[in-house]
Amino acid sequence: MIVKNMPGGGTLVAGNFVYSSEPDGLTIIHTNFGATFISPVIFEDPAVEFDILKVNYIGSMLAPPNVMAIGSANDYMNLEDLKKAKGLKFAAVQPAAMGTIAAALVSEFFGFEDTKIISGYAGSSAQHLALGRGETDAFVTPASSYNIALSKGFVKSPPVMVFGTERSPYFPDVPLFSELLDLTPEQQALVDITNVLSYADMIEAGPPGIPEDRLKFMREKFLEINALPAFQRITKNIWPVWVEPKTAEEIEAIQKMTASVAPEEVAKLKELTEKYISIIK
Amino acid sequence: MVLEAFAQALGNLTSISIWVWLLLGVIWGLVFGLVPGIGGVTAMAIFLGVALFLEPMQALPVLVALMAVSATGGSITAVLLGIPGDNVNVVTIFDGFPMTKKGEGGRALGAALTASVLGGVGPAFFTLGMVIVVLPFVMALTSMDMVFIILIGLSFVVMMSKGSMIKGLISAGVGLLLATIGLAFSTGEPRFTFGNPYLYDGIHIIVVAMGLFAIPVMVELAMKGGTIAEAGTPIKGMHDVWMGAKDVFHNWKLWLRSSLIGYVFGVMPGVGVTGALFISYGYAKASSKHPELFGTGVVEGVIGPESANNAKESGALLTTLALGVPGSVTGAMMLAALIILGFAPGPSMLTEHLDLSLTLLILLAAANVIAVMICYPLAPRMAGIARIPSRLLVPLVVGMVFVGVYVSQGLIQDVIALLIFSALGVAVRHFGYNAGALILAFILGRLFEDYLMIGLQVGGPLFFLRPISLFLILIIITIFAYGPLKRVLKRRFLT
């Protein structure tokens, strides 16, 4: 087996490469679900050269939810404090990132006053440092990143809210974003897109056209490996709560949702996000 | 508690297995460092996959060794062939390679190796003592202050500009322009990518370093013929190497200050440690009695950057362990390794796992010593590379460079980009522009823009009105004003 690290284009170089490779079942991509197969599609990145409905998904695992957390260098303790605050700053990586969009929705729907999303931090470590220094006040991030920030003492516990369609077993008492508000249908449509964007699983996939028997074999073996206690023990170093892996059928259902996201709704989401990013205004 | 942890750390070090793994890591790191384009980061990335199946006290010594010594391996090729093993070795070329051409390759190697080991060992030992000072300093800095720290680095373009200042500034301008290629972090806008995802992350630094330095040197050698060492120049053996080692002790103030520069930059996350090397070179030049000789092959031009190069890893390891924030790319690899091995880098590494942190710092120092013990006896033979005919050396080295560049990311596009940057490098060299200024601006330009954008978002247009930022602005003004002011005062007091 040859493991080839293929950086570039935020995983798109690798995604395009695998999509166009020989469909013999020998070339597989292991990547972040949202970063490769959801976000670039929803935001119509011109570099995307694959059709997400034709990709052969094998399975996905390690799905930490996205959470919103408050930095340790300020006096805000919970959502009520944030609602009363003025001039909150959210740390974000870039405008199309899940964390940025979620921060914009939270600010808009809860009516935070004078909020700014500070876009441009070079990854989660930079965001953590910004929170620890008091340069920013909060952020939205995968829970694995939140855990790391917590271990460094840069954020408070517990997170303020979780994003997604169901509560996380790791944060059973932390409410979902959608539970905290009575959303209008228009708001719900934007939250639905955010929920799709929030998938941070590690996914395995291959090009279209893999022979059925090989695909079936890989999918079965994927689930068997995930069920091994030794495998679960090693992966708990990365994410301590074991969540059942997603099957290919579940991933295909998610991708149907991705493909059906209306461009007009995406445009509204972008407009809303840009309202809070001061460098774009 | 500290004494107890220190005693435990010493106890850890009595295990023979730790030293065996450390030695393996040193050899691996030196070999990878020697191959142009590969370097410590690639070596660590490859080893991470193996680390999953090892015990922590088997994996960590290897990783620490790779972090410590890959720059040392790269400095050997920088001195002897004019080719950086990695981008952190670029600055060593400026005077190291001219020394080899003059037949002083052994001396340059001796100076590089000695400066490396002292730069690597000294800071490792005072690192823990500096925790009380360093960590609050790192936490006090904000993105707004980083703008000016990067600008200090960029201002050393002036120092890099030997000869024509205009050409130096033009070279820096080209570097800044090349740094804009890719996705702008703050806005997500693609710039000069032409819809090609390969360019989304910008041009890979290895491609730029090899294209600007490695290939033009080989092209020049191929056209000139002969050998690297100029005809008639003797190549002395071990005597030359020891002379280089003694040079470091004669210039102990330069070594100390350069190590401090490297260490401080290593401690600061996100600032780009390459800037430290240019600053230490610039400092060496500014503090020399004969700054006009820099670039022609002076040993101080090797001592400065080599001291900083190894000192930075101690600083980077400290912030990686204590804050969980990597101070260098190798620090980022170490962070990933610690997490994979079940540790949580952060304050607990200075309390609950203080003995482990101490062990790693001692191993970092030890790795530097072992690397130099391996390289010293081989140095005279390695200096003999300067006598290999170009018809043998050029195809071998060019082949290694292309393979190294391809291996670094596994992308054929890097090889195509290398061809383009090689042409640029040859042109820069031929027309007397400044490759050093170009690469400095390329590396720091992107960082400068990113921090500037964040600074403006956080603090508005007057974001610099902070005590730390104002102090840094004062340093920048001093850097530019120092030369002219010195000349004016000299003239006034002499007339």
Image (cartoon, helix red, strand yellow):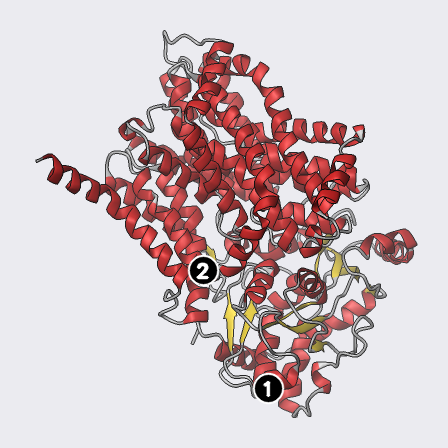
The answer to whether one can see residue A110 in this image is: yes
Q: In the shown orientation, is residue B105 left or right of residue B24?
A: left
Residue B451, numbered label = 2
Please give the name of the residue rendered at 41% of the width and 57% of the height, measured from the top-left corner: B147
Residue B111 against residue B346 in the figure, above or below: above
Residue A91 against residue A231 in the figure, above or below: below
The answer to whether one can see residue B411 in this image is: no
Quadrant of the rendered structure where residue B216 is? top left
Label 1 crowding class (10 Å Cα cut-off): few <14, some 14-19, many 20+?
some
Question: In the rendered image, which residue does mark 1 sit on?
Answer: A83
Residue A167 against residue B234 in the figure, above or below: below
Q: Position of residue B166 (x, y in %)?
A: 23, 42
In whole angstroms, how far apart are the C-alphas of marks 2 and 1? 29 Å
Q: Position of residue B29 (x, y in %)?
A: 64, 31
Give the SS element for disc 1: helix
Q: In the shown orientation, is residue B59 left or right of residue A137?
A: right
* Quarter occupied by the C terminus of chain B: top left
Which sits in the foreground, B465 or B165? B465
